[in-house]
Image (spheres, rainbow, N blue to C red):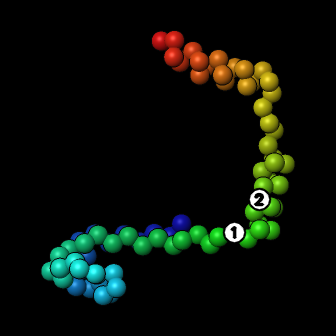
Amino acid sequence: MNKIVRNHYAAADLPADLRGSIDISSRVSVTVEVEPLPLGREALVAMTRAIQTDSRGTTPEEAVARIRALRDEWDD
């Protein structure tokens, strides 16, 4: 993800719609991040199928072992 951070940025240099009621003599921190594009239906379906195909699942023995480990954390 692309991200730009500017600390101690002059509020006077901000566009008016971002500055709002901030005093122009102030210093601000500005963070700009690129928003990810929403995935379309086809991309979501393809991603879901790929995850399901690559998933090996959990055996009953593994599930029981995980549950017992979690339960045993509370026994201390």
Q: Is residue 50 above or below residue 16?
A: above
Q: How many numbered discs sit on the rendered protein?
A: 2
Image coordinates of residue 1 in percent, x first then y, are 54, 66
| Residue at 42% in and 73% down | 32
Residue sitting farthest toward the top? 75
Instruction: Characterize the local packing of mark 1: few (<14), some (14-19) or many (20 or more) Cα atoms within 10 angstroms.
Output: few
| Residue at 80% in and 61% down | 45
State the residue position of label 2.
47
Q: Can you tell which quarter of the image residue 41 is in?
A: bottom right
| Residue at 25% in and 76% down | 9
- Please give the label number shown on residue 59: none
Image coordinates of residue 61 in percent, x first then y, are 78, 21
Instruction: Tell me the CA gap for discs 2 and 1.
Output: 10 Å
Q: Nearer the viewer, residue 15 or 20?
A: 20
State the residue position of label 1.
39
Res. 54 visible in picture = yes
Position of residue 15 in the picture relative to residue 64 (left or right): left
Instruction: Characterize the local packing of mark 2: few (<14), some (14-19) or many (20 or more) Cα atoms within 10 angstroms.
Output: few
User: Mark 2 vs mark 1: which is more N-terminal?
Assistant: 1
Residue sitting farthest toward the front? 21
Q: Nearer the viewer, residue 15 or 1?
A: 15
Q: Is residue 29 above or below residue 59?
A: below
- Badge 2 element: helix
Image coordinates of residue 51 in percent, x first then y, are 78, 51
Residue type (three-letter) at the residue carrying disc 2:
Met
Residue type (three-letter) at the residue carrying disc 1:
Leu
Q: Is residue 58 above or below residue 72?
A: below
- Badge 1 element: loop
Res. 10 visible in picture = no
The answer to the question of whether label 2 and label 1 lie on touching residues, with beta carbons closer than 8 A, is yes
Position of residue 30 in the picture relative to residue 11 (left or right): right
| Residue at 47% in and 70% down | 33
